[in-house]
Image (spheres, coloured by chain):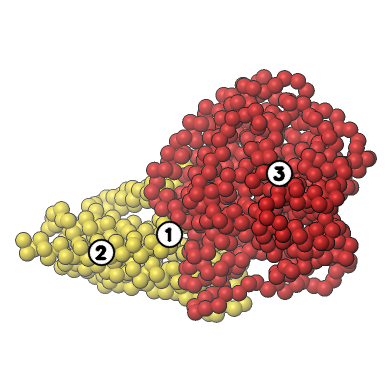
Chain colours: A red, B yellow
Amino acid sequence: MMGNVTLLEFLSMGREVANHRPWPRYQLDAKGWRQLVEQMTVSNWEILAEWGEPAEVHVLLRGEDSGAIAVASHPCPDGAFFALGQVRPAAIRLERAIRDLWGLIPEGLEDQRPWLDHGHWRVTHPLGRPRQYDGGRHLYKFLTAEGDGLHQIPVGPVHAGVIEPGHFRFHCQGETVVRLEERLGYVHKGIEGLLAGKPILDAARIAGRVSGDATVAYAIAFARAVEAALGLDIPPRAHWLRALMAELERIANHLFDIGAICNDAAFAIMLSHMGALREKILAANHAIFGHRLLMDRVVPGGVSMDLDEAGRQRLAALLPRLRHGFKRAVALYDQTPSLLDRTTGTGMIHGTLAHRFGVSGFVGRASSRSVDARRMPGYPPYDDLDFAIPVLAEGDVHARVQIRMEEVRASLALIEQILTGLPDGAFLTALPMRAGEGVALVESFRGEVAFWVRLSETGKVVRAHPHDPSWFQWPLLEAAIEGNIVADFPLCNKSFNCSYSGHDL
Amino acid sequence: MNAMLWQILQIILVVALAPLVTGYVRWVKARLNGRRGPVPIQPYRDLYRLLQKEAIVAHSASWIFRAAPYVTFASVWLAACIVPTFTTNMVLAPAADLIALVALLAVGRFWTALAGMDVGTAFGGLGASREMLIASLAEPAMLMVTFSLSLISGTTAPAQIVSFVLAGNVGVEVSLGLALAALVMVAIAENGRIPIDNPATHLELTMVHEAMVLEYSGRHLAMIEAAGMVRLTLFIALIATLFAPWGIAQPGAGALGVLVGMGAFLAKTFLLASTLAVFETSIAKMRVFRYADFLGGALLLGLLATIFLYVSEAV
């Protein structure tokens, strides 16, 4: 172990891989990888994503003080690697998934239970060396809790409402939650298998569907990774239009989620107000870009359609109406004590825990982590735009609502700036055919979406990995509910609103 | 003879009207939320649909599970029959009093809670335990209201309380105001309305009443739902009858008087139902551990109502 060493200094002892942009990738041998794991006990480097290949494991790291980003890779032909989950709890589920998908064994990991593989796949290790599987379902052992008067409440995977599937196992003492354990993976779609071998533009359509509510963010992340791999510069107008769509998506999601949180406290009128505001955005999206959720409007090389003057004016006219409606809804929230009583002090996440899990997005920012991929590492056009990143320390449901309200205001201001400063010129460039590897980090409404791609000379995706911010938010939800009452779980859950689809891949 | 006729009419009326009252509350709430909302007669269609459907019963369910919907419905219906709505001239009026009413409602709740636990699912038990927590506080509060009313009027029979009030024997009393507040709070809790319970929620973990009846389907569910609707109508009628008895026909009032009583009852019912919808729209659901504060408040108000009677007498 070394004392004061930066991430890049440390990794430079490995072999740098050529053609990996914009941040370097280093290959570490078994000794180097083990040293990395050990070094991480003293250095506060964050894991941004971790994924595999049939005989290699990769981790995307950020050196926290410097903000430097790099990929560390570890070829492991013998099918095992020293687990990062030993020093970073956030990596545990990622490594369990790596084992399920690629068959690489995370050595030293205490929790060796499967994660995404529920025993319903016809093969084991579908992305590694697949083998026929007919062994029936695994018996999944939930973690236990012991004590007087404890009882279990199993919830899901099928819920009473029309929502995504996930299983929640509560251990309760009366109404108080002693332990919550999640079981996810019910919406595994084999995204990475689908992406492999696809032409870039086909892959972009799939990337935009990893998690439908963050389709713009995913499309931008994929496009930026591809453009990095190709060493391609896209026209400035494309950057600005992407940001415009990303902010529209952010506002629409934040509005609806704020309404949904209040609805879970049986304050339905907020959802009605917010739903009406969101509908204004979606209707404008449809009229201007031809798709309510803006799917497939961001493509590698730029954006698939331009914003004309009529569209610009429509958006400019929409802004004051959104501001006005939002202001009234916020006032309603602030002036309803029965609602504030539910959100304040519920589902606390302490800053240290948020820090340990490297959680991003509004969940992190409500627990004193000021991370935002638009600022650090930053990407165009946000370097030219002026926006604040709200941070609070309380870490409860109320704080998460407050952060999202601030972000709506910030995004409205961003859209205003984008509409006035939108540069002229082309909005799409042709993609060259070139081999390479690229990685991108993009701020979705939930948090940091990472995308890594490897392209072949023939213009196809060899391998790609999307990483949803929910990977690090789901475990914190378990911590947030501990000591709260069972009946507050829906409220906490909605205040996180993690993605099932983006997590289950 | 007339007493028998009006009693039969009352028995039919409470059941026939109950789905409309529930549908009306839902419709007003939808309107307040800016939605078009289902027509107020939708609950009739829902009940009809449920009655047509097959009733699925869990393998682990005993006879209690099958009997509970009928017992619950019957006890709530019977309770509704003894609350004078449009006339006090009814056969059952002397037979039953407010304490019997509390007991009948308790029977219905007891059976629903038993059925919730009978199938052995986690939600049934969760709902039953919450329901019993609410009941243990709501019932004494309801009894305190009964006591203060009977201390004023010298009787626990609702029909005689109405006659007593209509005869002009009661002025504006602090005790009556406190008792009214307590009864409204109890009514909210008993009917599973916001802020105690959310009748429209899909979130299993927050449910109280719905959690107990999650396993029901078909005609069983129709019975449970109908019992809930009758209970809401019953409490609205009870509040209207005890605290605003004006218009209710007295014995010997004749057909015209009964007609006036009917009109007054409908007007009062829909006015109170609208108030409920407005109230529910403007407030969020409270945390489970605040139930005790809320219903403890109701109990206290009921107690104060009784105490004030003695205090004012002493003065």
Residue indicated by mark 2? B300
Looking at the rendering, in which quadrant would you find the N terminus of chain A?
bottom right
What percent of the width, then of the height, locates residue A6?
Answer: 71, 48
Which chain is home to disc 3? Answer: A
Count of all numbered marks drawn on residues in the image: 3
- Amino acid on which disc 1 is placed: Arg
Residue at screen point 42% across, 39% down: A331
Residue drawn at x 20%, y 63% is B304
Q: Nearer the viewer, mark 1 or mark 2?
A: 1
Residue A52: quadrant of the picture: bottom right
In the picture, measured across the screen, residue A180 lies left or right of residue B286, that is right
- To which residue does mark 1 refer? B287
Q: Secondary structure at mark 3?
A: loop
Q: Are marks 1 and 2 on the same chain?
A: yes
Frontmost of labels 3 and 1 is: 3
x and y percent of residue B116 in the render? 50, 72
Q: Can you say which quadrant of the picture contains the C terminus of chain A?
A: bottom right
> In the depicted view, which residue is nearer to us: A186 or A198?
A198
The amino acid type of the residue labelled 2 equals Leu
Q: Is residue A184 visible?
A: no
